[in-house]
Amino acid sequence: MPNVNFKTIPTDVPLTVENIDRLANRAAELATAFGARIANIQQQVADARDRFSRDGDDLVRETDSANRAVAKQFARRQLASRIAKFRLTIVESSRGQREELLRPLAKVAADAAFLLTLCQSPAQMLGRVALGDARRTQYQTQLEGAGPVELETAAITAIATGDMPLAAAVATVVDRRPSDRRPFSVAAFAERVWGAQHAEVTAKLKGVLLAERTARAANDEFVRGKADPIANLSNQLAARAIAEASGEEDEA
């Protein structure tokens, strides 16, 4: 059995709907700001290219016709050299501006990644519902010796009434039994009770990770001066999957 390194577990990342919404909103805010910043820097590169290109055109225009072909070749080489030098300079000079947004975005993504480990399935999430609640404790005590019919009735009642402490108690009692003595699948029951909430939460958390990954891809693309088609395709597919999971694609 692998040992858990409790020292690596963060203590400032509460597993609450409010915190998950906060992470999602903060990631969107930082990613939007980063996109605007990259666009601004890219525009500076484009403006420099236009400026250098005009300089080259002026050089060619001022050259006599006999030497114009040579002047055009020189202007092209000079344009490529000046752009390359400008890009190197602006990549380095803008590093702090870019990291100013990427660092907090990475922290938000790390928090989301941790919370995802606590939301791996509807059953895992349902198991945490009403922990310490007296009603859940009472339900579990009453159901410990229950037979299949009683447990099925309790499960149906929990679904029909939306009684989450009862649902959590049923899931816990059934899960503690040997697999060959369980009257029904805990996973199927939890999916029915907590599936929608699980899908919503995981979509938001995965959206945070995607926001950070997309920003990093944009940053890498800027530094390299060219796109990574595989990374971009991967992010597009991930975005589509997240939209489908959260129901946004249907609404669109």
Image (cartoon, helix red, strand yellow):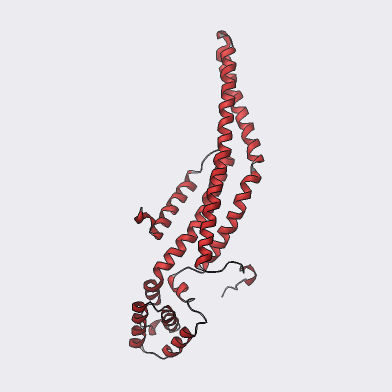
Q: Position of residue 55 (x, y in %)?
A: 59, 21
Q: Splitting the image into 4 quarters, where does residue 54 fall?
A: top right
Closest to the observer, 166 or 177: 166
How many marks are shown on the rendered structure?
0
Residue at left offset 40%, top offset 77% = 186
Q: Position of residue 218 (x, y in %)?
A: 54, 45
Residue at left offset 58%, top offset 26% = 51
Q: Splitting the image into 4 quarters, where does residue 52 fall?
A: top right
Q: Position of residue 169 (x, y in %)?
A: 44, 82
Q: Quadrant of the N terminus?
A: bottom right
Residue at left offset 33%, top offset 78% = 160
Closest to the observer, 200 or 148: 200
Q: Position of residue 99 (x, y in %)?
A: 63, 48
Residue 248 versus residue 11 in the image, above or below: above
For this view, does 69 lie left or right of residue 145?
Answer: right
Residue 58 versus residue 92 in the image, above or below: above
Residue 164 versus residue 238 in the image, above or below: below
